Image (cartoon, rainbow, N blue to C red):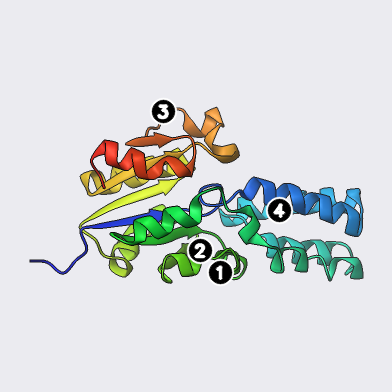
């Protein structure tokens, strides 16, 4: 009998396990108070430019660009602390902690997230998610291009991928086929963007992350 676990359930983070849209709205309000609305608007312009260049969000790198573009205005220096010290645990979606605890009793759970190598792991740690999945955390620039590495680091006979981006889930399904069950969580701005969802589908669709266990049972996955 193979020692490889039968099932691994892998979660995205932003707008899947916690409300990243709310974090961004909160950050905007705090930046307005700290450095003023014009500078705050500039932050998001630089953010979108950098995201286009990198292919993923880089909040801290955006602070660096804003500081340099402002002729090193010292008002930007404490701004990054707004995120580094942010109470991310307060933005977990309802039921996430209990969900991970319940699933972790019988299955391997893990996090596979896109993002940078500084803020993203800090976010996962400070929210309690790192501990909740026993440190099984992988971060990539584009996780759909790193599935061989995912399988090597978190081996399983079958995978469940849970994400708020159905287009990404579709790309994973095309590569792994019957090896994976994809779960689309309709949370956050990507989940309701017709340009992101048109022509793509997932094996399971849920409206909130709290529905996952019941839907997996109905699907015969868990």
The residue depicted at 83 percent of the width and 66 percent of the height is: 67
**From the viewer's perspective, is residue 168 above or below residue 51?**
above
Dot placed on the residue nearer the N-terminal end, 3 or 4: 4
Q: Which residue is mark 1?
A: 125
Residue 90 coordinates in the image, percent (x, y): 65, 56
Dot placed on the residue nearer the N-terminal end, 3 or 2: 2
The residue depicted at 40 percent of the width and 52 percent of the height is: 144
173 lies left or right of 53: left
Bin the neighbour count of mark 3 within 10 Å (Cα to Cα): few under 14, some 14-19, many 20 and up.
few
Q: Which mark is residue 129?
A: 2
Disc nearest the viewer among 4 and 1: 1
Disc nearest the viewer among 4 and 2: 2
Residue 27 is at least partly visible in this image: yes
88 lies left or right of 117: right
Q: Which mark is residue 47?
A: 4
Disc nearest the viewer among 3 and 2: 2
Residue 80 is at least partly visible in this image: no
Q: CA distance from mark 3 to mark 4?
A: 28 Å
Dot placed on the residue nearer the N-terminal end, 4 or 2: 4
Q: Which mark is residue 85?
A: none
162 lies left or right of 48: left
Q: Which residue is mark 3?
A: 199
**From the viewer's perspective, is residue 78 above or below residue 197?**
below
**From the viewer's perspective, is residue 85 above or below residue 95?**
below
Bin the neighbour count of mark 2 within 10 Å (Cα to Cα): few under 14, some 14-19, many 20 and up.
many
- Helix, strand or loop status at disc 3: loop
In the foreground, 49 or 5: 5
């Amino acid at each position: 009998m193979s020692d490889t676990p039968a099932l691994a359930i892998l979660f995205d983070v932003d707008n899947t396990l916690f409300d990243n849209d709310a974090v961004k709205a909160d950050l905007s309000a705090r930046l307005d108070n700290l450095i003023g609305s014009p500078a705050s608007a500039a932050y998001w312009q630089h953010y979108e430019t950098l995201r286009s260049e990198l292919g993923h969000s880089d909040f801290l790198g955006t602070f660096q660009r804003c500081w340099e573009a402002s002729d090193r205005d010292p008002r930007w220096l404490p701004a990054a602390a707004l995120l580094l010290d942010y109470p991310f645990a307060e933005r977990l979606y309802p039921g996430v902690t209990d969900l991970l605890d319940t699933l972790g009793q019988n299955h391997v759970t893990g996090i596979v997230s896109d993002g940078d190598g500084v803020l993203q792991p800090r976010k996962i740690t400070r929210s309690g998610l790192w501990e909740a999945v026993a440190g099984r955390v992988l971060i990539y620039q584009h996780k759909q291009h790193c599935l061989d590495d995912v399988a090597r680091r978190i081996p399983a006979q079958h995978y469940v991928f849970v994400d708020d981006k159905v287009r990404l889930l579709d790309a994973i399904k095309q590569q792994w086929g019957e090896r994976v069950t994809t779960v689309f969580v309709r949370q956050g701005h990507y989940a309701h963007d017709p340009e992101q969802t048109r022509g793509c589908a997932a094996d399971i669709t849920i409206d909130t992350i709290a529905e996952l266990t019941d839907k997996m049972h109905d699907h015969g996955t868990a």
